[in-house]
Amino acid sequence: QLSGVDDVIIRGNINVLGQNSDLKIVTPTSIYIEGFLDVSDRINIMGGFDSNGISTASSVNPATLSSVYIHGTSRINSKQAASSINIQGALDVDILGAVVAGGTIGANGVTWAGNDSTVTVNAGQQLYLDTGLLASKDVSINSGSAGADDKGLGLIITPAGGVTAMGLSSNNTGALISMNNKGNMEMMGTLVSGGKLVQTFDVNGNMLSQTINWQGSYGKILINSEGLAFF
């Protein structure tokens, strides 16, 4: 466990690779990650919470930083089957680096380790997603009401953002992408439930093709927004 009474800033890599090993990062202020987190089983990232999991948002200046900020050069990866990644911020959560639960990231995408891995992201205010969230089974995204600096948007998924739930489950329940938002939302990315997005690019980074590999189970997408939803 990594914890502190002030901001936690991680610019190096953390490897916790023993069988069934976990990693927990918690602070009552903000967490900034600019490295690779490779963990066998469970990853818990909690910004704006005390060691008992109680929100400290009321004592944090909302104009400073996000409760959790994951930089675009970072990678959050749990590797075992039935592993999980939980990212929780008392205020804003900004995710720009890849998050993968239950597999190994390679040159040609993710090789899944097995069934039942999940990703859960909870934001007390705005959730901003500019990358992929991938899990072998389910992905859950939950955002709060927009803060004063959030331009009325509780959830933003950019064109570069998206969610993949493969649907590999031991009880044959398939895949579920669940999105819940207490404010207005903009969804400009790609959601794939029950399959895997496959993209090819040229040497300049321009996308040449995009297809879906339906090797998973059947999938479901549930979206609930208390405000306006723009797609």
Image (spheres, helix red, strand yellow):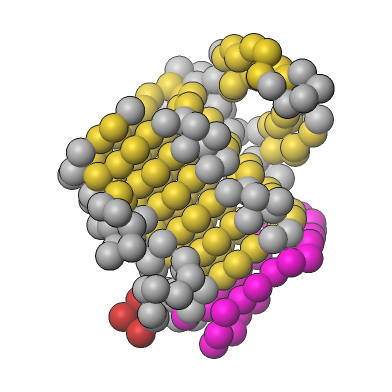
**Image location (x, y in percent) of residue 150:** 33, 57
> For this view, does 106 lie left or right of residue 118?
right
Q: How many marks?
A: 0
Residue at the location (25% across, 35% down)? 229
Question: Which x, y percent locates residue 48?
Answer: 44, 74
Q: Residue furthest front?
A: 204
Q: Nearer the viewer, residue 88 or 43?
A: 88
Between 86 and 35, which is closer to the camera in this rendering?
A: 35
Q: Nearer the viewer, residue 51 or 70?
A: 70
Report if residue 78 is visible in the image.
no
Please tell me whether residue 7 belongs to the stretch shown in magenta.
yes
- Residue sitting at 59 percent across and 57 percent down? 70
The quarter of the image holding the C terminus is top left
**Is residue 29 something that shows in the picture?**
yes
**Which residue corresponds to the image point at 77% horizontal and 25% vertical from the top-left?**
204
Q: Where is residue 125 drawn, in percent x and y?
A: 33, 60
User: In the rendering, at what x and y percent does residue 137 appear?
Assistant: 52, 34
Q: Vertical placement of 229 versus 39: above or below?
A: above
Magenta stretch contains residue 10:
yes
Q: Nearer the viewer, residue 53 or 73?
A: 73
Q: Quadrant of residue 98?
A: top right
Q: Quadrant of residue 8?
A: bottom right
Magenta region, residue range? 1-28
User: Where 128 falls versus 33 (above or below)?
Assistant: above
Q: Is residue 169 left or right of residue 39?
A: left
Tell me the quarter of the image containing the N terminus: bottom right
Above/below status of 55 relative to 157: below
